[in-house]
Amino acid sequence: EKQLELRRKEEQERARRAQEESRGLSDEVREMMEAGKAYIEKIKRSNDAIPGEEISNKISHMQTIVERIFERVKEYPDCAGELRRFMDYYLPTTVKLLDAYEELDRQPVQGENIRNGKQEIEKTLDTLNLAFEKLLDRKVWQWEKGLAPDAYIIHGAADISRDADFQAGRFSIQSQSS
């Protein structure tokens, strides 16, 4: 009974903090922040579910980067629209990769195909971490300087499941004038 009461109070406190944080934000930005929190929670749950120090470090790093991106959105809500592709494609793809890794890791027999699949996902997580870092660094600099926004595109991942360049880690963030 005490645990139930404690849990209820924690949920109320979280809801109060979320409401406080979202004051003054547009509905679009508020929705983006809520979706971002859900992605961060999923990344965290995947990290908890997947054993192994090396993969855990990669996932933890990713979680930190994504959290920082959303902290910046909170600071610069007018720039939230620039992260549409990040929200609509890269975060859902990241979650699918983590789900796939969890599924592969649960297999009772870890044959060559499963090991190779896990290695490919780990390489892709490295690539995503690098891309997310570059996105964060570039956007932070841009937003803090109040510069006119550019559209940043992560190349090579139009269809992550079939794109050899992306799977091999050959893509980068490049500027294109909007």
Image (tube, rainbow, N blue to C red):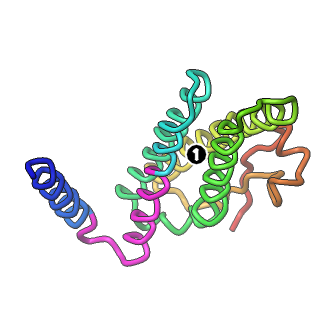
Residue found farthest to the top: 53
Kindly identify the residue that appears in the image at 73 percent across and 52 percent down.
154
Where does the image place residue 160, in percent across and percent down from the top left? 80, 54
Q: Is residue 29 magenta?
A: yes
Quadrant into which the C terminus falls: bottom right
Horizontal placement of 94 versus 109: left or right?
Answer: left
* Residue denoted by label 1: 138
Query: Could you tell me residue 68's position as x and y percent?
Result: 44, 44
Q: Nearer the viewer, residue 126 or 102?
A: 102
Residue 19 sits above or below residue 72 on the image: below
Please tell me whether residue 71 is drawn above or below residue 21 in the rendered image: above
Q: Is residue 15 left or right of residue 172?
A: left
Which is more toward the observer, 70 or 17? Answer: 17
Q: Considering depth in this image, is 168 or 44 the residue closer to the camera?
A: 44
Q: Residue furthest front?
A: 108
Tell me the SS state at disc 1.
helix
Identify the main secondary structure in magenta: helix
Residue 79 is situated, as x and y percent measured from the top left of the image, at: 48, 64
Task: Please give the range of residues in magenta.
Answer: 22-41
**Magenta highlight on residue 32:** yes
